[in-house]
């Protein structure tokens, strides 16, 4: 209740994000004038993310077939692998790590992001 009151009296720009849109009550949702939804990456988006994070390697075709990858998955993998030596870092290793990210999502992989 306090948050809703603060939102109504706030004179500025307030930005919020959630992966749990279905858990927000209607009173909360009404306080947000603009609502955005982000879907998982399509094959061309996957390739662009790959190029952004791992430009030294070609994006494997199998990765483009993952239907639940999000930009955050690439960031998580990059954060884990960025300190590996050049000898240990290759496209296969990156692809394996991205696959792990997809598996970690479990039943939540089909959930949309944003609200």
Image (spheres, rainbow, N blue to C red):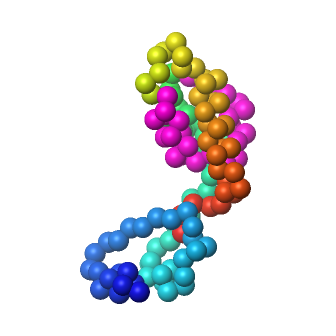
Q: In the rendered view, tell whether residue 102 sits above or below residue 63.
A: below
Whole-percent x, y for residue 79 in the image: 46, 35
Vertical placement of residue 95 versus 7, above or below? above
**Is residue 74 among what the camera can see?**
yes
Write the residue at 50% across / 80% down.
29
Q: Where does residue 102 sit, x and y in percent of width and height?
A: 66, 44
State the quadrant of the N terminus.
bottom left
The quarter holding residue 38 reads bottom right
Q: Is residue 77 left or right of residue 67?
A: left
Q: Residue furthest top?
A: 87
52 lies left or right of 101: left
Q: Is residue 96 above or below residue 4?
A: above
Residue at the location (43% across, 24% down)? 83
Reply yes or no: does residue 63 show up in magenta: yes
Is 58 placed left or right of 78 in the picture?
A: right
Q: Residue 78: horizontal and vertical position, in percent?
A: 49, 34
Is the stretch drawn in magenta largely helix, strand or loop?
helix
Q: Is residue 72 magenta?
A: yes
Which span is picked out in magenta? 57-81
Q: Quadrant of the C terminus?
A: bottom right
Task: Give me the residue at 72% from left, 32% from top.
Answer: 62
Name the residue at 36% across, 84% down: 2
Measuring from the top left, give residue 3's x and y in whole percent. Answer: 38, 81
80 and 21: which one is in front?
Answer: 80
């Amino acid at each position: 209740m306090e948050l809703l009151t603060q939102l109504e009296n706030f004179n500025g720009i307030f930005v919020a994000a959630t992966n749990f849109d279905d858990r927000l009550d209607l009173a909360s949702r009404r306080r947000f004038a603009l609502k955005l939804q982000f879907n998982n990456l399509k094959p061309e988006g996957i390739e662009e993310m790959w190029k952004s994070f791992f430009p030294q390697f070609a994006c494997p075709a199998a990765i483009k077939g993952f239907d639940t990858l999000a930009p955050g998955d690439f960031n998580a993998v990059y954060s884990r692998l960025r300190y590996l030596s050049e000898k240990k870092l290759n496209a296969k290793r990156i692809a394996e790590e991205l696959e792990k990210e997809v598996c970690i999502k479990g039943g939540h992989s089909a959930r949309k992001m944003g609200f």
